[in-house]
Amino acid sequence: MRKKTRRMGGSGKKSRRQFLAAVASRACAITCYRPVTPSTSPMIPVCGESDADLAPFDELMTSFVTEHQVPGAALAVTKDGSLVYARGFGWADVEAKRPVAPKALFRIASVSKPITAVAVLQLVERGLLKTDDKVLDLLGLSPYLQAGTKPDERWQQITVADCLRHTGGWDRDVSGDPIGWAREIGAAFGLRGPATPADIVRFMMGQPLDFEPGSRFAYSNLGYLVLGRIIEKVTGEKYEAHVKREVLEPLGIRSARLGFALARRRANGEVKYYDSQHRTGPSLWPPHQQVPVQYGVDNLDGFEAHGGWIASAVDLVRFAAAFDKPEACRLLRPATIAEMWSRPAGAAGYEADGRPKAAYYGYGWSVRPVGDEGQANHWHSGHIAGSEALLVRRWDGLDWAVVFNTANTPDGKNRLVTLIDGLIHQAADQVKRWPSRNLFDMYLA
């Protein structure tokens, strides 16, 4: 039992961490209902420390949330490793009129992939596996085979690097995405509920590949579920527990965790999600009644290593900023970081005529080289029913994360992260003076 050092009614002195946490709480309470919007925009709640020098971000977010009828959003920005901006906009819960706090937790969908990739590369550094290891040698799983079928022999060629870079041989545009087959795969295994990540991997081990492993890029959620199983097999730990301890806790990130599909399992501090088209469907969980699409129609519990994390915008930029100074990185060595963002060989990294592609996928990150001095932008986006997320590391020392508690514009035609991506770059370019403060002490306290 932890020894209590103070009792209520004592001297009233607080630790530095308690003091900073209290300041963060007051900052939200003070600014929560102060509109930072053009006069033509309706008032929306805005939480977090304000700074006139960073007004371009305020103006962008308030106008964007208003124009696209976004219930709630959060934006966090770092400059040279320091958190200079962290604000919430709109409602974490529209019905309860609970504003979005800067530290609010959101489903981050595929922005989970860089986190998983770092966990894998740490194991490579420790000599527990190699990127050219064959995944079948590591998984320790038996394929689910339908009567009269046998495994595709090309599964024996798939490497850890193929899973990291989406060159494993699966193409969801050809055969579909198995993360959407939770009901069917669960039924194949005789489950009353949806399939687990291991079930999905085992089922797909009995299915044919769509192309020769390593021959080209095709975005694949399945490859990251395979990596999650490898992390568990190599470490002997559950995926979430291992990633929390080895990837997140060294950075002071304590609130991020795997999320759950059902509304009743929403975490403390997590926002409520809204579908912009107000769709419903049968729940994957008994008794399989009609539910909002964002609360049980998709198998969020099974997204795990490819898209199951919830985190705050502050958590995400803390993770991104960990790589700003490779020589001081707490997670990976400089050589490994360089490998994480290196260009893949062949069609994944080069055009048919041999020219380098303008952008490519490294180990868990999209990469766009900038200029001729080895600089690049790194990013990942995420999109599932009820939420979107975007994490960007810009070549000039700026990192940012934006998260939404809805997905798509109300007409369903556009993704929010696609629309806001260039606008955040523009807002950053409009900032004339950057503050010297570091809000990580406040928001990670």
Image (cartoon, rainbow, N blue to C red):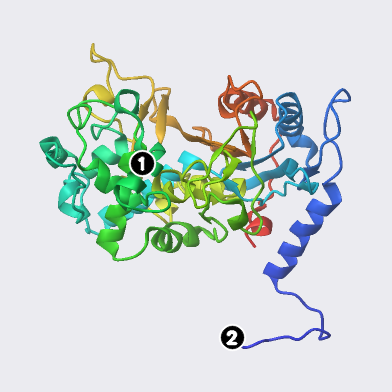
Q: Is residue 278 left or right of residue 217?
A: right
Vertical placement of residue 43 versus 270, above or below: above
Q: CA distance from mark 2 to mark 1?
A: 48 Å
Secondary structure state at the residue bearing disc 1:
helix
Residue under label 1: 184
Which amino acid, mark 2? Arg
Which amino acid, mark 1? Glu
Residue under label 2: 2
Q: Is residue 300 left or right of residue 45?
A: left
Q: Position of residue 110 (x, y in %)?
A: 46, 39
The tag earlier along the polypeptide, 2 or 1, is 2
- Dot 2: few (<14), some (14–19), or many (≥20) neighbours within 10 Å? few
Q: Position of residue 62 (x, y in %)?
A: 76, 31
Vertical placement of residue 118 versus 253, above or below: above
Comparing 143 with 131, the one in front is: 143
Comparing 181 with 336, the one in front is: 181
Q: Quadrant of residue 224?
A: top left
Q: Residue at x 30, y 34 (%)?
A: 166
Comparing 10 with 195, the one in front is: 195
Q: Residue at x 40, y 55 (%)?
A: 331
Q: Quadrant of residue 362?
A: top left
Residue 246 seen:
yes
Residue 338 seen:
no
